Image: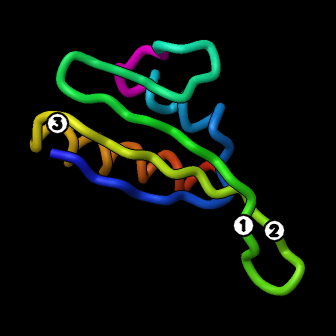
Amino acid sequence: MRRRKEYRGISKRLAADYLENLGGERVDPDGDRVEAADWAADLDAETVEAAGSIELTEVTVEFEGEAAAVEELIESFTRKAMRAGG
């Protein structure tokens, strides 16, 4: 299974940290890929316009792996990412 989701207001470094806390391990020095036994995640970040002149970092995470593991990972990761700003 493969799913792609975007998260705003979180850095790629913090996203990789969260994925490590959820059982993954960074497999490259830039933190672009985090892998675990039954899932992997590829990270990318860009600056996007939120409204008018306001810009935010948007991290795209492409999750892949066993369906049940990916669904659980997305749910846990999304909860962490939502709390990142506060």
Q: What residue sits right under mark 1 in the picture?
A: 48
Query: Would you say residue 42 sits in the magenta stretch?
Result: no
Query: In the image, which is nearer the foreground, mark 1 or mark 3?
Result: 1
Residue pictured at 38% horizontal, 20% vertical: 24
- On the picture, is 24 further left or further right than 1? right
The residues colored magenta run 21-26
Q: Earlier in the sequence, mark 1 or mark 2?
A: 1
Judged from this view, the residue extending furthest toward the right is 53
* Residues tagged 1 and 2 counted as in contact (Cβ below 8 A): yes
Residue pictured at 63% horizontal, 57% vertical: 58
Q: Which mark is residue 9?
A: none
Query: Would you say residue 24 sits in the magenta stretch?
Result: yes
Q: What residue sits right under mark 3 in the picture?
A: 69
Mark 2 packing: few (<14 Cα in 10 Å), some, or many (20+)?
few
- Locate residue 37, reporting x and y percent: 21, 16
Q: How many marks?
A: 3
Split into 4 quadrants, where in the image is the C terminus?
A: bottom right
- On the picture, is 58 further left or further right than 47? left
User: Real-space Cα distance between discs 2 and 3?
Assistant: 33 Å
Q: Is residue 70 visible?
A: yes
Q: Which mark is residue 55?
A: 2
Q: Is residue 32 above or below residue 44?
A: above
Mark 1 packing: few (<14 Cα in 10 Å), some, or many (20+)?
few
**Kind of residue sitting beneath label 3:** Ala
Element under disc 2: strand
Q: Is residue 37 above or below residue 78?
A: above
**Kind of residue sitting beneath label 2:** Glu
